[in-house]
Image (cartoon, coloured by chain):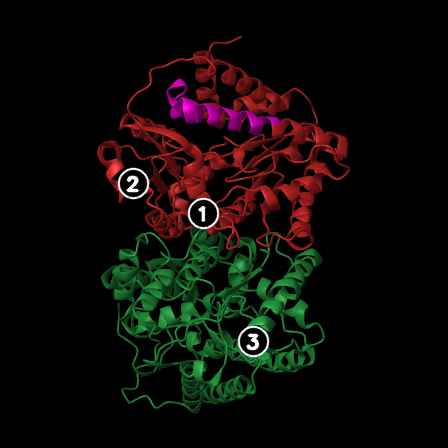
Chain colours: A green, B red
Amino acid sequence: MSSKPEKENRKVEKEKSMIIQKEMIGKLFKDLSTAKETGKKVVYTFVPGNLSELIHAFDMLPVYPEINALQSGMRKKSGGYIREAEKYGHSEDVCTYVKCDIGMMLNGNIGPTGEKIPDPDLLLLSYTGCFTFMKWFENLEDLYPGVEIAMLHTPYQKDGEITEEMTQYMVKQLKEEVIPKMEKVSGIKYDETKLKGILENSVKAEDLIVKIFDTPKNIPSPIDAYFAGVYYIGPINIGFRGTSEAVDYYAELYKEILERVEKGLGPVTPEGEINEERFRLVVEGPPNWTSFREFWKLFYDLGAVIVASSYTKVGGVYDTGFRHNPGKPLESLSEYCMFCYTNLNLPQRIDLLSNCITEYHADGFLVNSIKSCNSFSAGQLLMMRTLEEKLEIPVGFIESDLVDPRYFSYANIKNRLESFFQMLEQRKIILAQ
Amino acid sequence: MSTLQEIINKCKNLAFDLNFEKAKEWKAEENDRVLIGYMPIYFPREIVHAVNGLAVGILGVGDRKQVIKGDAYYQSYICRIPRGIIELALDGHLEGFDGFVFPSICDVIRNLSGMFQILKKGKFVDYLDYPQNFQLEVGGEFYKNELQQVLNEIKKINKVEIIPEKLNHSIKLYNNNRNLIEKIYDVRQKFPWRLTAEELYYIVRAGLVMPVEEHNKILEDVYGYIQEEIGEPMDKIKVIISGAFCEQPPVSLIKTIEMAGCYVVDDDMILGSRWIEGNVNDDTDDPLNALVEAYLTKSTFSSSVYDINNPKEDRLIELVEKRKADGIIFAAPSFCDPALLDRPLLQKACDDRNVRYISFKYSENTGQFKNIKEQVGAFADSIKLWSDELIES
């Protein structure tokens, strides 16, 4: 490749929103570590289709096993945990989030802050967009025998729509399965007025997050919507949706980003700002967590900025108009679950990505195909080919894994990315002629 | 009447006919007949039968066709079966099919339904979302609506409306089909040498591609033949194969297991044909509801079903006891999340209850069996030589 874009080599100062987020997450884990003393009940659940508002309505604390797994990946602990789970009998072929989580449990369930994560009082299986979730919780139930468990089956958007029957099926499950279990475990009666109040905060946070992920339509993009985006979606995905803290956090974050837009600044990376935005990309698929920094560096070193990604929609797709509705609390919780990215059918996913490529003025489309995640990966090659034909846009393909360090091949990924970026550069030259 | 060997040969040819000629010939006989292809595991074929259709099981290509195009659609870490199915679709093997049903069993089959939508295969593509809630008024109602959607799609094609009398009749035929298969399994439990596992596999699998009336006749004849003492009993252990419910093992793998010293007395290959345990009510004003109730209350255990209230590990051990099996062979396809994520739970149950087992993985096109033969042989020998000691401990 030709010359690298310059980055400001300065110590990156944490912005106020980063500090707020750190404090929010720190407090959550602190609350979890003292849950048994304070009497707070603990719910294990999943990010896609998470029922944060309902959990708050019962004054319970959430634990997200896949968040623990990705945190273990970033802290270089996942490799050991996965091996532990494989010794326990799990195949090398299956989802590494599951194995990392089980390995962590077998090793004392020490969370990312070094404090023990309490055992669950309730396993809330929000079975949304990922079949493996179901198998995961069957395994958890075996590790925590006798724990209360509630299943919420989210119908798949097979025809690209949500029907009244699908919504009613979910509402019935909430009324007859999920809420009674939460009442039983928490000892608190379901209070719909309280839930409605919480949902009002959700709407505010959702409005803000849509505005935030809209800002990369600016050129240059003020943010990286994938590598930084995964931090931005943290609060809304891991239990803070519905809280005033989340609204405050997103308001502050949006303010900071708008300042960047006004100044014409590019995204902040761990090594400073990107001063020259050379390639604008839309990325499909989750990132690799075990080598997250090195992975990101491969992009920002060459001035590649991710302007939109499907992964940031895994905990909810808000940019096509969905908002929680305090007027219809259970219906809107149901619709939220059905609107998560991996619960969309493949034609819907293609449409969504196609819109992103067009509206965000992307130069290319890249798939990071994750070995562990069939929910994302199966069909990606056809999706990629369809987008290439439809939009006549360069497409790239790399493979890695979520948290298994054995499946991150730095040299392979670097080679492929460099070839992809060369292709993008050539195309820019041709288009400019 | 054909001889048993003639029946077996016929079923062998039908079971692996990747052009589905038998089904296509059946469709060609009348104008309003439809062919509906369905993927593993279970689909209530009764509803298609009742509206002048034939539901045809599509199980991939096994080791009968080289997959070239299909590999371009899937990463290396995804199982084999969807590659073969895409290959069949792209090579025109599925021409003449009117629609395709993808039961909800895993993310790969789910997303394959989207690929068929994108590739515009068939007049309709339906992802059949099985409820994971088993209350009649909750999951049952949802499931009934799912079945009605399939019927609506078929009606758009052939204009045939479902009527209770016809569906009751179809249910009766499939009840008979399942009963006959079960009776054959029961005979084989006591006299497994009368019909090999390979032969049984051909006979049951052929039922996925032919009218149920014809398959029932075959099953009746086979059942009749195995009432007599045929074949030679051998000194083999009795095993159950578990984990092979979707991507099918190559026939040579089944033969290898038997040649290595095992009688396979139960299995979950072609599980969809045995999914409902017992009869569905075939004399009711609401037969669609009868199918729904049967699914909710009479389904067998499977990795695709959420079963905290009726754990599959308990039911597997019950099956071992029912079949008086000496052990279990956990044989699952590579990269099969449902089967492989179940393994530690199932194996733990075996450890807790002193049931012997071995485990390995396969692909539908596995071609080397030496290692498996050695592993299975050692397993069979260990049980024959030391089973008493283990039981006493």
- Same subunit, tags 3 and 2: no
Label 3 sits on a secondary structure element that is helix
| Mark 3–mark 2 distance (CA, rounded to whole Å) | 46 Å
Residue B17 visible: no
**Chain label for disc 2:** B
Sooner in the amino-acid sequence: mark 2 or mark 1: 1
At a point 49% along the width and 68% down the height, the residue shown is A45
Count of labels in the image? 3
Magenta-drawn segment: B176-202
Instruction: Provide the residue designation for mark 2.
Output: B391
**Chain label for disc 1:** B
Q: Is residue B184 magenta?
A: yes
Return the x and y of residue A332 as percentages of the image width and height.
65, 69
**Chain label for disc 3:** A
Return the x and y of residue A94 as percentages of the image width and height.
36, 54
**CB contact under 8 Å: marks 2 and 1:** no
Return the x and y of residue A50 as percentages of the image width and height.
53, 69
Q: Are there few (<14), some (14-19), or many (20+) residues within 10 Å of tag 1?
A: some
Which mark identifies residue A186?
A: 3
Q: Are there few (<14), some (14-19), or many (20+) residues within 10 Å of tag 2?
A: few
Label 2 sits on a secondary structure element that is helix
Answer above or below: position of B172 versus A429.
above
Residue B266 appears left or right of B217: left
At a point 63% along the width and 41% down the height, the residue shown is B294
| Mark 3–mark 1 distance (CA, rounded to whole Å) | 30 Å
Badge 3 amino acid: Ser
Badge 1 amino acid: Asp
Label 1 sits on a secondary structure element that is helix
